[in-house]
Image: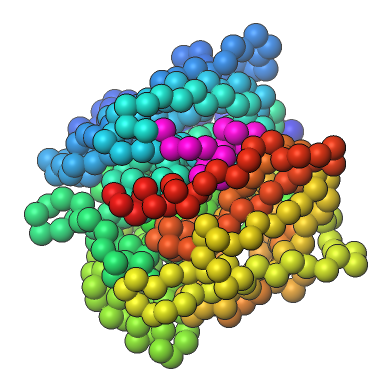
Amino acid sequence: MRTAPQAPSPPATRLRGLCLNFLLVFGCNEGTPSGRGDPSAQSVSKGRGTLAEERSDGPSQSRGPIELSLEARAGSWEIEPGRRVDAFTYNGTVPGPTIRGRVGDEVVVHFKNSLDEPTTIHWHGLRISAAMDGSPATQRPVPAGGEFEYRFTLPDAGTFWYHPHVRESEQMERGLYGAIVVEGDREPEVDADHLIVLDDVRIDSSGQIAPGSSRDIYPGREGNVLLVNGRRGLELNARRGQVQRWRFINVANARFFLLRLEDHSLQVIGSDGGFAEAPRTVDQLLITPGDRFDVLVSATGEPGSESTLLSLPVSSVRHGHGRSRRGHGRSRRGHARGPSRGDVGDALLRMEYSMLSPLPAREVTVPYARLPDLGPEGIQPTVIRLGDRGCCGSGRFTINGVSHPNVPPQVAYVGQTQVWNVWNDTRGPHPFHLHGYFFQVLGASAARQPVRAWEDNLNIPPGEQVRIAFRPEGRPGRWLYHCHILEHGEHGMAAELVVIDRAGAEPNAPIDSRQNAEQQEQM
Ligand code: C2O
Ligand code: CU
């Protein structure tokens, strides 16, 4: 099932690719000038802690839990060599440690909050119990100095991430996020497996991360420095003939990344919930906040050449098409002062080809998913209308006309298919995120999703209605759904889904999120 038989690859070659993974994500700085890789990032997993080594282990039965300590604490973040900003970190690094495991692994996280403010950890995309979800629907924030033990089993293969769910627009802007990579039984045999975490920060004239302002609420806060894995100017190596897997995560508050890799197309093989049903090849890939994409890159460049991964301007997708909004968008953009140099795009990272002789071309087998059909048969869709009211400054966002925490929850039974019409009734886009369950996109709106895949995060363009379906397979509890432009979610565009098991009561009483919200606003 793995490598095409006609193109066996020498183990040494494969290893080299895997070491590149090391270089990018773990900072094994072999032969590279310092500061190029990611020297401070750590990774936590079983055994000796690399995807490469685990992959060659074969199946292992006697794996104990993945146990790690995570401490949220103030720290210093080197966004490029010699340039440091005050930050919030997990264990002193941005991104926090990458958690690597396999489907079925148990994870135990001893979390300590050493910030001066409350926080939680949400495990974005992991289908775990509501009590461990870290959202304001299920967990009171861990106070300053407090501790909490998160414990769950990794349910699905794919790329996920973790971040706080308290005052997200500040805490995440300041650096609180980390990646989770989960391998399944069958993974494509690739020459390198790179994690590419996309972010931006807004650096003010003092050289520090600017505090958020009320002017950021409507457009969402975009930064003026683009980062990959918490750094500027990252490079990765390639050798002609390789097939590399790039796992993208957009952790930015509000920035839409429209990616293009010079001289290469991107083969999208999966998204939020793992492999898609089929591949699709694109020249540009839009990744909105909260999204993940799993991409194969065929290294077709000449030895010694280099290609840049570009972030293209997105004003038309990002700021909507409505006339009044456009003017609005422009002035906001002026305010946000993106780093854009016009139509060329901004460099995110450089792919550098070695002088080594090309590897023979080969096919990589991907275990594409097959999704059950959750098509609506006589199901009257629930309308989820994303709205806004007021205009500027202190304006608030709504769901069905009401702002969080006052939106009445949606209620669903375990096993009952839900069909939601998510309707963006505003003039800007909203990346919609559902906690706890993956959904699929149905019907005409599937035009936007030419290939089906499980999603937990989906951009809804202005004016559009997108029909999604999901089936809570268990895990009753209170789950949040919200816009993943963090300023929007925080200012009203959030609500709860209460999943009830047939037998009876929901497992946790509502948490007084109003109280939480007030606490947050006071800070
Ligand atoms: Cu990525 Cu409710 O979150
Ligand atoms: Cu939004």
Residue 369's x, y, as percent? 74, 45
Question: What secondary structure is the stretch in magenta mostly built from?
Answer: loop
Is residue 363 inside the magenta stretch? Answer: no
Residues in magenta, as a range: 128-142
Instruction: Using the image as rendered, state which of residue 35 and residue 441 is in the foreground.
Output: 441
Q: Quadrant of the N terminus?
A: top right
Residue at (67, 41) in percent of width and height: 477
Residue at the (76%, 44%) spot, across then down: 500
Q: Where is residue 383 in the image (x, y as percent from the top left)?
A: 70, 70
Q: Nearer the viewer, residue 45 or 186?
A: 45
The extreme bottom residue here reads 323
Q: Is residue 367 visible?
A: no
Observer-nearest of 300 and 397: 397
Whether residue 387 is visible, yes or no, is yes
Residue extending furthest toward the right: 378
Residue 134 belongs to magenta span: yes
Residue 242 vs 488, above or below: the answer is above
Q: Is residue 225 left or right of residue 136?
A: left
How many labels, in total? 0
The residue that appears at 49% across and 75% down in the rendered structure is: 388
